[in-house]
Image (cartoon, grey):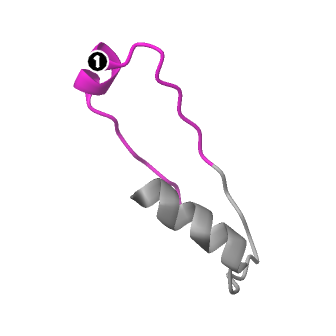
Amino acid sequence: MTELFYSIADEIFARFPGYARGVVLAYDVTNGESPSEVVSLLREAEA
């Protein structure tokens, strides 16, 4: 596995002092079709 590096601008922490971050690594995951209920909720949140 290659190393993962990322950075977050200091301005983010200044503007959002409680900002927390995390990284999730998932292996052998296959995306499938989402249930229509989930898609509807996502579209509602996007709006």
Q: Main secondary structure of the magenta part?
A: loop
Amino acid of disc 1: Arg
Give whichever of 31, 47 is nearer the camera: 47
Question: What is the number of callouts on the image?
Answer: 1
Report x, y in % for residue 27. 74, 70
Q: Residue 1, can we see it?
A: no
Q: Is residue 4 magenta?
A: yes
- Vertical arrangement, residue 17 with respect to residue 27, above or below: above
Residue at figure coordinates x 59%, y 38% from the top left? 22
Asked which secondary structure carries label 1, the reply is helix
Report x, y in % for residue 28. 76, 77
Q: Quadrant of the N terminus?
A: bottom right
Q: Residue 33, can we see it?
A: yes
Residue at figure coordinates x 53%, y 26% from the top left? 20
Badge 1: residue crowd in 10 Å (few <14, some 14–19, many ≥20) = few
Residue 21 falls left or right of residue 31: left
Residue at figure coordinates x 70%, y 85% from the top left? 32
The residue sitting at the right extreme is 28
* Residue that badge 1 annotates: 15
Give the magenta part as a residue range: 1-23
Report x, y in % for residue 33. 68, 86
Image quarter of residue 46: bottom left
Residue 29 falls left or right of residue 45: right
Give whichever of 8, 1 is nearer the camera: 8
Residue 30 falls left or right of residue 47: right
Report x, y in % for residue 30. 72, 82
Q: Quadrant of the C terminus?
A: bottom left
